[in-house]
Image (spheres, rainbow, N blue to C red):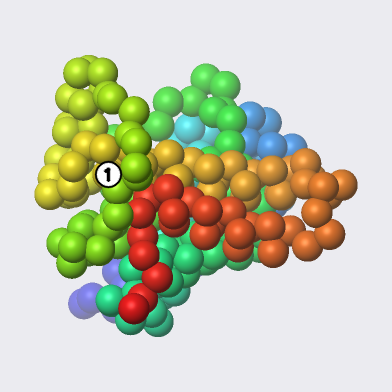
Amino acid sequence: MGAPGTARARARAALTSEILEVARRQLATVGADQLSLRAVARELEMVPSGLYRYYASRDDLLTALIIEAYNAVGDQAERALSAIPEADHRGRWRAVCTSVREWAVAHPQEFALIYGSPVPGYRAPADTVAPSGRVYTLLLGIVGDSARAGRLTKPAREPSMPPTLVEDAVALMATLGASDLAPADLLRAITAWTQVLGAISQELFGHLDVAFRNNGEYFEHAVDLMADVVGLASPS
């Protein structure tokens, strides 16, 4: 009795995968803002109404691509993290950051979709929130582990934080499951991560091509600089 339903489910999953693959190709050629359900249907030799049974609008298709991209980079970061000893907090920071760069170099359009400019007219729904926080959660977990081990160093001088920024940091820590961090620790980690993302973006979009002979070496140095900002010590 279950065989026909299972066969239909497999067929639907296969076509869904094919739809997303065609949509990813569109990202590479026309960009997210020009993504078109009709163009996807045309390439698949489907009538648009058939595609609407899978994705009711362009925004639904964009959401699926965004969630898929966040999960792909999150999966890669988790695999990289699992290879590094838990006590090596700085090495774990390096591993996550490097894995994101490697994924971005291999998937530049997907990286631009989730970390680049917003798509005009698109508002991400709530179901993108959890996938978007996966890499953040890994990095904050590393910072939290270092703090609990008594190995997270503080800068000699730390700027004072306005009360509203402290409140925002506390709320964000609760959302990301990092309530045991100090607000200043969280702000250093977020600042460092945005700098790492900026280095990846600068490389992907060609802005470092005339600056450094080896972008990989520059990136590794930047990641280490940001590990210092966070306060992650090398393993003893």
The answer to whether residue 129 shows anywhere in this view is no
Residue drawn at x 27%, y 57% is 152
Based on the displayed image, in which of its 4 quarters is residue 187 positioned?
top left
Q: Secondary structure at mark 1?
A: helix
Closest to the observer, 118 or 163: 163
The answer to whether residue 126 is above or below residue 229 is above
Please count the marks in the image: 1
Q: Is residue 69 left or right of residue 160?
A: right
Q: Is residue 156 left or right of residue 58?
A: left
Residue drawn at x 48%, y 32% is 59
Q: Quadrant of the C terminus?
A: bottom left
Residue lying furthest front: 156
Closest to the observer, 80 or 106: 80
Closest to the observer, 187 or 108: 187
Residue lying furthest right: 210
Point out residue 211 in the picture as x, y percentages from the top left corner. 82, 47
Point out residue 228 in the picture as x, y percentages from the top left corner. 44, 54
Residue type at mark 1: give it: Asp
Q: Alpha-carbon neighbours of circle 1 within 10 Å: few (<14), some, or many (≥20)?
A: many
Label 1 sits on residue: 185
Point out residue 120 in the picture as x, y percentages from the top left corner. 57, 22
Point out residue 132 in the picture as x, y percentages from the top left corner. 38, 46
Based on the displayed image, in which of its 4 quarters is residue 119 positioned?
top right
